[in-house]
Amino acid sequence: MKQTIHLLFVWGMIGFILGGCWDRKELNELGIAIGIGVDMVGDQYQVTAQVVIPSAVASKSSPSAGSPVVTYEATAPTIQEAIQKMTDTSPRSIYLSHIRMLILGEEYARKGISDVIEALMREPFTRSDFYIAIAKNNKASTILKIPTALEKLPANKMFASLDTLTKTWAPATKVTMDQLLSDLTNPDIQSTLPALEAVGDIESSIEKGEDDTKSISPGTILRFSGIGVFQKDRLLGWINERDSKGFNYIRNKVDSTTGHADCQGGGNIALLTLSSDTKNKVMIRDGEPVILISVTNNSTVREVNCEHMKLDSMDDIKEIEDASNEKIVEIMKHSVETVRHQYKSDIFGFGQLIHQSKPKLWKRLKEEKENPFMDLQIEYKAETKIKKIGSLFESFQKQMKE
């Protein structure tokens, strides 16, 4: 009798464990979406899915296999309804576990984006490591229909471009779902998202499809240009590449970038940032908070267009470092003042910094001022160290003129 009970118990446990596969689906039943776009049509959501065509991306496919992706669209009162409604036209249910990019139309972003974050965070199959961007001056559905060169899958191209751009140039910022959700739920910092822009003859490129990418110069290119500034979950507007780089310096998001410093007497010198580190802290002066921003840069000389410059001179190296420091401070200061005057939105996290280090002071500031960010005292400091100067001590252009 005991053996029978034990056997029934074991079989019951096995059945319970195997029950975890009740909702499994075969791969040939799924349409794997790598890009999702959200726009507004009236008071309804228009959702666009960029779905992979497996046969077109298979390694043995011929070059004439056709487009590697297809887009499906649906409009409904809720985002999840729109996604499920795509089965009206798609032979497979849309699977969201492999999303690389979430694109939000500008018109939609200006009305508030919290609902799409809510919908996707509740979706059990959606991971949170994809990037989010705003379709600047465009609809998300349009962006997802533009073919791309080099990368077969447009959403993968966007993901790779943003990843590379933030590591090597720093005029934009990459944001995942987790990061955006954290910012949206934090009252002491405002959100930012990268701007994704389509440049060229968009209608012609969409009509030509894959044929457009076979040209040396494609009719339309997708580029990340600047950052979108938010107040809570609503897009307010944009800051350009220069101010975006200043933002990234302040938020310690610069891995590497290239810039130039002006030389005394004319000309300029290009510097490659090898590494950058920013430390922000709060100090109290006359009872008021002062934000201290300190950037440390390790750089190398990449181009010299200054006639008087001698790179074997420590005085000249010091001049380059001082000019670089001045340029970095100028970029950061301009970024803060632009955001203050145009948007009055603390995207830099100064409020969060004060709240973390001086919570009582921050509470008093919020009680006394409607927006403490507007008149915060901020001091900037940069320290550049030239680590390498290349294989030439002097510019050969100078030698040519002698």
Image (spheres, helix red, strand yellow):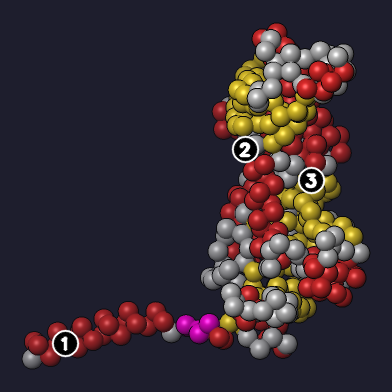
Please tell me whether residue 146 belongs to the stretch shown in magenta.
Answer: no
Q: Main secondary structure of the magenta part?
A: loop
Asked where in the image residue 279 lies, by quadrant, the reply is top right
User: Which quadrant would residue 186 be assigned to in this image?
Assistant: top right
Q: Secondary structure at mark 3?
A: strand
What is the x, y in percent for residue 226?
A: 79, 45
**Circle number at residue 255:** 2
- The residue identified by callout 1 is 7
Residue at image x 62%, y 66%?
A: 99
Residue lying at 78% horizontally and 22% vertically, measured from the top left: 396
Q: What segment carries the magenta color?
A: 23-27
Q: Is residue 174 left or right of residue 12?
A: right
Name which of mark 3 and mark 1 comes first in the sequence: 1
* Badge 1: residue crowd in 10 Å (few <14, some 14–19, many ≥20): few
Q: Residues within 10 Å of mark 2 (few under 14, many from 20)?
A: some
SS of the residue under disc 1:
helix
Question: 14 or 63, which is in the foreground?
Answer: 63
